[in-house]
Image (spheres, helix red, strand yellow):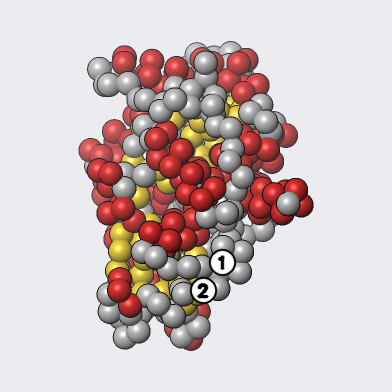
Amino acid sequence: MHHQTIGRVALAAASLAATAGLLSGCSYGAKAEAAPAKQTEAVSGAKLSADTVKIGYFPNLTHGTALVGLQDGLFQKELGSTRIKSQYFNAGPAEIEALNAGSIDIGWIGPNSAINGYAKSHGTSLRIIGGSASGGVKLVVNPAKIGSLDELRGKKIATPQLGGTQDVALLNYLAGKGYKVDPASGAGDVNVLRTENKVVPEAYKSGSIDGAWVPEPTASRLVTLGAKVLLDEKSLWPGGVFVTTNIIVSQKFLAAHPDVVEAVLRGAVATNAFIKADPEKAKADANLRIKADTGNALPPAILDPAWASIDFIDDPLAATLQAGADHAVAAGLLDKPELAGIVDLTLLNKVLTAAGRPAAADAGLGVK
């Protein structure tokens, strides 16, 4: 039993959460690629308590706050002459390792990766300090094989990675509908096939999968191949909101440089306001950053619907973070983690209050 427990924890720790589709076409559960060259932003103005702040993110639309904020200099505006060194990642565990090693100070990341990083460090590695994205996850199917949600029995449905956020969401949904599926193998009344995002379109075209529960832009890629959106995960959550991407910080950096962390959060809030005010320009700017990072911009047929399905938020939606962890435990993919203290909204709420905005809630997961 102990051995199985360790295996489940290790498995869950290897998963990359929430997230949301890697726009380079790589799976968010893929092995970490060679670290890309770090980018340093231009600086001017007063320096804060740190000479530099190292920011990590994914070249994903669900990391649009980071993409737009970096592309348009909105973080740098708040940081003055404190330099930004940015680095992108293609896997959550790699970003957590970089945070633990001090290679980055602040990161945009999915909820399962944040939960696993916190649990593995026994609550010493990170804090979730803000929200970034909600939504952008869909069940997309071959309409010739699946005409309704009542026709899933015996079908083959892909998720990006065993134990990842979308995998947990699908298993939770199927269990709620009375389907029995072995969480480890994916075999059962519905066959859950763990398939990297970059492989999903070819698997769909070959007929080896009948559908997929995937983040954007993978869902929109499949739609361009003739697939149909059967379910938007938003419909399963109260108010249609659930965390896809959060902002984390190393506890060491937060303690040493709260002024720098606050400045980054001011930049994030300003960026999300800009995204809401001018979504078309923000979408184009996010795509420019993706092209700069990966060499490939997204075509409009994929970019437009994917962007429209994501809500950019300041609130980390702590209650849905807890719910996602509970779903993973219920599915047998994660031992119950102790999440008390994973969230620290002190600085975010300072920024929101200064902007005349209501404070975000920590859902009982805050630092005591």
What residue is at 43 percent from the left and 61 percent from the top?
Answer: 175
Residue on which the image places disc 2: 188
What residue is at 62 percent from the left and 15 percent from the top?
Answer: 256
What residue is at 45 percent from the left and 17 percent from the top?
Answer: 346
- Residue 196, percent from left and from top: 56, 67
- Residue 273, percent from left and from top: 29, 33
* Horizontal relation, residue 99 to residue 246: left or right: right
- In the image, is residue 212 above or below residue 357? below
Q: Nearer the viewer, residue 172 or 34?
A: 172
Mark 2 burial class by Cα count in 10 Å: few <14, some 14-19, many 20+: some
Residue on which the image places disc 1: 182
Q: Could you tell me the amino acid type at mark 2? A: Gly
The mark nearer the N terminus, 2 or 1, is 1
Give the number of callouts.
Answer: 2
- In the image, is residue 50 above or below residue 290? above
Do labels 2 and 1 touch, CB within 8 Å?
yes
Mark 1 burial class by Cα count in 10 Å: few <14, some 14-19, many 20+: some
For mark 1, give the secondary structure.
Answer: loop
Visible residue check, residue 283: no
- In the image, is residue 280 above or below residue 192? above
- Residue 20, percent from left and from top: 45, 54
* Horizontal relation, residue 290 to residue 300: left or right: right
Q: Nearer the viewer, residue 298 or 361?
A: 361
Which image quadrant is residue 77 in?
top left
- In the image, is residue 339 above or below residue 260? below
| Residue closest to the far left | 277
Visible residue check, residue 154: yes
Which image quadrant is residue 312 in?
top left
Q: CA distance from mark 2 to mark 1?
A: 6 Å
For mark 2, give the secondary structure.
Answer: loop
What residue is at 35 percent from the left and 50 percent from the top?
Answer: 135
Q: Nearer the viewer, residue 90 or 78?
A: 90
